[in-house]
């Protein structure tokens, strides 16, 4: 459901050996196989995280702004040298806890390598395709960490079935969830929206906030990681029959309508079996919405 009509899925994290290009990058790694090279890097996403990580000598940069410039240059170089370039947020607290759990010295490059390619955290990886690092990409990395934690929670609720293609019930729930999302968008029509979703689950609420752009021809633009998370949370709610609330809000309209846009906000609720218009006005994460349209009337 992206603009190019396909969804990129990151299902593995391949890294090995050490990359030592012109720029110092002790937190980047690659696979050395000639036919399948990949580069994985952890990126500090705030000045506070940069200061906290100084003791581990991740970078020689004097400040965070310089660190971002050097990292951007490193990523550009990696794109020229490797077939695949991926990044994830380097979270200092997560890294400290990882080292403590595995008895690793956080100053050692091997500890950072193991942290980056830790299989349970591979859902936090994003493909880097030349985006401006200090623009939207760094915030996406931070969101990807939160999304990854939510995906792990959802997978636990499904007994590991979220990525197990053998689980027919989960697979059917995933398809139903994707269809719910599609019908919400079809009913809304073209516009710029945000979908907020909350499902009450054991262990804490599963939440999603995803920005969506829909053109007049029905083509949808949404970050792939957000689409994956939306469908996973909808799937979990339906598979486990958990109550939930969804709000789609934003500006409805298009350039073909003479550039006229109007604020809109619709709400749906689920008792666990299916999604239907909310019983009355609702507020989710500060966003007020009126009951939405019936999804079973949307083709």
Image: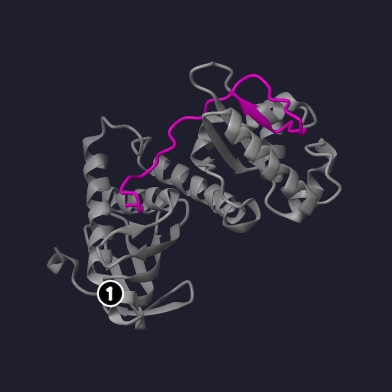
Name the foreground residue: 298 vs 70: 70
Residue 133 is covered by the magenta coloring: no
Residue 254, visible in the rendered structure: no
**179 lies above or below 260:** above
Tag 1 secondary structure: loop
Residue 261, visible in the rendered structure: yes
Residue 189 is left or right of residue 133, and the answer is: left
Residue 7 is covered by the magenta coloring: yes
**Residue under the image location 34 percent in, 49 percent down:** 4
Residue 274 position within the rendered picture, expressed as x and y whole percent measured from the top left: 22, 60
Residue 157 is left or right of residue 18, and the answer is: left
Magenta segment, prevailing SS (helix, strand or loop): loop
Residue 148 is left or right of residue 276, and the answer is: right
**288 lies above or below 206:** below
Residues rendered magenta in the picture: 1-30
**Residue under the image location 58 percent in, 49 percent down:** 141
Dividing the picture into quadrants, the one containing residue 116 is top right
Residue 124 position within the rendered picture, expressed as x and y whole percent measured from the top left: 53, 42
**Residue under the image location 56 percent in, 47 percent down:** 145
Dividing the picture into quadrants, the one containing residue 257 is bottom left
Badge 1 crowding class, 10 Å Cα cut-off, few under 14, some 14 to 19, many 20 or more, is: many
Mark 1 lies on residue? 278
**Residue under the image location 22 percent in, 40 percent down:** 169
Residue 282 position within the rendered picture, expressed as x and y whole percent measured from the top left: 37, 78
Name the foreground residue: 189 vs 142: 189
**84 lies above or below 154:** above
**51 lies above or below 270:** above
């Amino acid at each position: 459901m992206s603009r190019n009509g396909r969804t990129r899925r990151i299902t593995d994290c391949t890294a090995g050996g050490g990359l030592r290009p012109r720029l110092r990058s002790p937190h980047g790694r690659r696979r050395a196989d000639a036919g399948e090279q990949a580069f994985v890097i952890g990126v500090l996403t705030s000045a506070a995280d940069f200061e906290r990580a100084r003791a581990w000598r991740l970078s020689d940069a004097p400040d965070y702004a310089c660190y971002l410039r050097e990292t951007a240059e490193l990523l550009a170089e990696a794109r020229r040298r490797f077939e695949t370039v991926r990044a994830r947020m380097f979270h200092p607290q997560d890294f400290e806890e990882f080292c403590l759990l595995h008895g690793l010295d956080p100053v050692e490059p091997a500890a950072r390598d193991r942290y980056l390619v830790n299989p349970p955290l591979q859902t936090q990886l994003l493909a880097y395709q030349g985006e401006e690092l200090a623009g939207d990409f760094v915030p996406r990395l931070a969101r990807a960490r939160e999304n990854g934690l939510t995906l792990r929670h959802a997978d636990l609720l499904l007994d590991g079935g979220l990525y197990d293609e053998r689980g027919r019930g989960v697979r059917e729930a995933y398809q139903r969830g994707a269809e719910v999302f599609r019908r919400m968008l079809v009913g809304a029509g073209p516009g710029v929206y945000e979908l907020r979703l909350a499902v009450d689950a054991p262990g804490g609420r599963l939440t999603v906030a995803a920005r969506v752009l829909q053109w007049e021809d029905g083509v949808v633009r949404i970050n792939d990681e957000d689409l994956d998370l939306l469908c996973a949370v909808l799937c979990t709610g339906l598979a486990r029959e958990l109550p939930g609330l969804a709000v789609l809000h934003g500006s409805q309209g298009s350039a073909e309508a003479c550039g006229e846009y109007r604020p809109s906000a619709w709400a749906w609720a689920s008792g666990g079996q299916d999604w239907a218009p909310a019983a009355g006005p609702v507020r989710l994460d500060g966003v007020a919405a009126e009951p939405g349209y019936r999804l079973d009337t949307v083709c």
